[in-house]
Amino acid sequence: MTTSQEQFQAVKRQNAPFFFPESAVWSDGVTRRFKVTDPNRAGIPSALGLSTQPIPASLRLLKVHPDDARPAPGASCQRPDGLLVLGMWTDEGQLSGGRTGVCRLVDGRAYPIPATAGGTPFLIRIVALSSDALATVSGNDLAGVGQGSHRALLPPGITLQPTDVITTGAGDQYRVIPPVQRDVLGDTLGLSWLGTATGRTPTPGTDPTPEPQTPVNPPEVDPWWEQTS
């Protein structure tokens, strides 16, 4: 570290409460002093961004006190606005000599769907890329046919493989299919919808066109057709 970098770090130590206002125990059991900033603050407000553009808006930048050990990628810390998961560290800054952590804020706005795969619970975001095909079940009742095309966005630390089956909290089941794009800030997967684990809820109300009774021989008038409103 150069002399100017050491001087810069000395200023940070002297003003630690300003530069590193937060302190918490991370998932590796180490207590750290740090600061988290939102790189999107120059644009739309964070709360609005997490509702309208949740994945880009969930990025966070992390600075750790120079006397505290930097967490390894994958380490996490619970904050009031969600779970902060570290994805990677940048190179050392030319001026400060410090590094910036690039993190993902994992909460229900960015990843709104609870799911499980292989018994492991996690949050996920599923984006439909095409409408599910429809098939006639009975009368005018329609039901979705499997193999619909979707994209899944996973938070950091969750790794799934092609052919893995995901079950959402609502009972929908998906199979992981290529392409699988690995990223330290969260993988992107292809999904194929398999249906629901508990069966689809019947269409509410009375079917307006029920099937008539099977005519007998000799033909008789089906009493259903004689009903009047």
Image: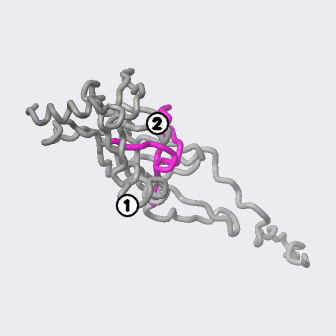
- Pointer 2 local density, CA inside 10 Å: few below 14, some 14–19, many at least 20: few
Residue type at mark 2: give it: Arg
Return the residue at label 1: 43
Q: On screen, 20 above or below 55?
A: above
Q: Is residue 88 left or right of residue 135?
A: left
| Quarter of the image where one finds residue 12 | top left
Query: Does the image show residue 33?
Result: yes
- Asked whether 65 or 157 is in front, the reply is 65
Rendered image coloring scheme: one colour
Magenta span: predominant SS is: strand
Q: What are the residue bounds of the magenta stretch? A: 103-128
Q: Secondary structure at mark 1?
A: loop
- Asked whether 38 or 217 is in front, the reply is 38
Q: In the rendered image, which quarter contains the N terminus?
A: top left
Return the residue at label 2: 79
Which residue sits at x=20%, y=30%? 10
Q: On screen, 35 above or below 138?
A: above
The percent position of residue 210, horizontal first and vertical second, equals: 77, 69
Which residue sits at x=41%, y=32%? 77
Residue type at mark 1: give it: Gly
Q: Is residue 69 magenta?
A: no
Q: On screen, 136 above or below 6?
A: below
Q: Secondary structure at mark 2?
A: strand
Q: CA distance from mark 1 to mark 2?
A: 22 Å
Q: Is residue 207 left or right of residue 7?
A: right
